[in-house]
Amino acid sequence: MRRKTAFISHPDYLDHDTGFGHPERPARLEAIHARLDQSEINRSLVRLEPRSATTDEIGFAHTDEHIDSIRRIAESGGGRVDYDTAVSAKSYDIALLSAGAVLRAVDAVADGETDNAFACVRPPGHHATPNRAMGFCLFNNVAVAARYAQRVKGLERVLIIDWDVHHGNGTQDVFYGDGSVFYFSIHQHPLYPGTGMAHEVGEGGGNGATLNIPVPAGSNDDDYVEAFEQRLIPAATAFNPDLVIVSAGFDAHEKDPLASVYVTTEGFGRLTDLVMRLADDCCGGRLVSALEGGYSLEGVSESVVKHLEHLGA
Ligand SMILES: [Zn+2]
């Protein structure tokens, strides 16, 4: 039997304006939607509307000062937080709607409305730390959703699998001392933001609940599958999560202009199968996935459709 897969997106995500020539651009989502419209899986998806996350929910992973600072920049007409990271006039509201889509995905999966769910959002989130926007990210959508799953939906243990080609320093920061959220990242190293060394394993109560696999430029599908099979799956099975959340960036794709890892579109299908099997074994298949990076329009759109085909298989 096919699985029920939710697809959650919103036209407003196109209005987050990062400026001319920025790689994290509205055309990414337009390319995904266009390719999805032509695909077989399109008709099988359960389309759900996102809602806006509340400031209390964003506060699960961020300081009030950080939330206020993004709101103020947007209210003043927009500006840059750093060289890479833009806030346009509408970006505060859109960032709340981006995080809210992942919360809606958690609701769908936790309540059994669908088997799994994909939030097709921007801005992305995994570089945003508790008190800082960076790396195209304003609020950490996945970190907020993991806390929401725990505090609102009563799911105690959450596994975050981050296969974006960049290390999710923000997500790691949020949960570094917390053993109830296991953070796994596979990422090209050296590459922005420079964190995510193998010796970064968590601290205090979170010691051992962070697993970083830095991989060199030139790594391919087989390297990724091997890391998942030999490192992620044993650690994650021992952790025994109640929910799996994927920080699904597709910038490890061979066509991506921002990195030099060569995962193929098929490769993302294989990785999807592996995380689904893990979720089946641990938590009844409960899996939420959220878009992070992916800057080749062809690479990201093909890979998202492949990801959805496998989620719904
Ligand atoms: Zn990335």
Image (cartoon, helix red, strand yellow):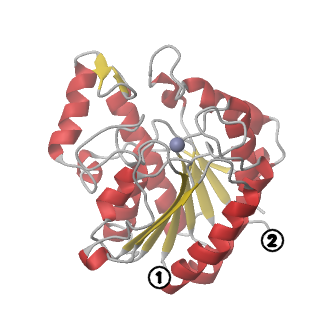
* Residue identifier under label 2: 1
| Res 95 → quadrant | top left
Q: Is residue 161 above or below residue 255?
A: below
Residue for point 35% across, 46% down: 53
**Image position, residue 89 (x, y; %):** 33, 19
**Residue 195 visible in this rendered orientation of the protein:** yes
Q: Nearer the viewer, residue 105 or 287?
A: 287
**Image position, residue 259 (x, y; %):** 60, 39
Residue for point 52% across, 68% down: 244
Give me the disc on residue 239: 1
Q: Is residue 293 above or below residue 2?
A: above
Q: Residues within 10 Å of mark 2 (few under 14, many from 20)?
A: few
Q: Nearer the viewer, residue 67 or 227?
A: 227
Q: Nearer the viewer, residue 122 or 175?
A: 175
Q: Is residue 215 left or right of residue 13?
A: right
Residue for point 22% across, 45% down: 131
Q: Nearer the viewer, residue 215 or 182?
A: 215
**Image position, residue 14 (x, y; %):** 52, 25
Amino acid type of the residue tagged 1 in the rendering: Phe
Look at the numbered disc 1 and give the secondary structure of its residue: helix
Q: Between marks 1 and 2, how big is the CA–CA gap?
A: 28 Å
Assess mark 2: CB under 8 A from ligand 1? no
**Residue 246 visible in this rendered orientation of the protein:** no
Q: Is residue 167 left or right of residue 147?
A: right
Amino acid type of the residue tagged 2 in the rendering: Met
Q: Is residue 296 above or below residue 41?
A: above
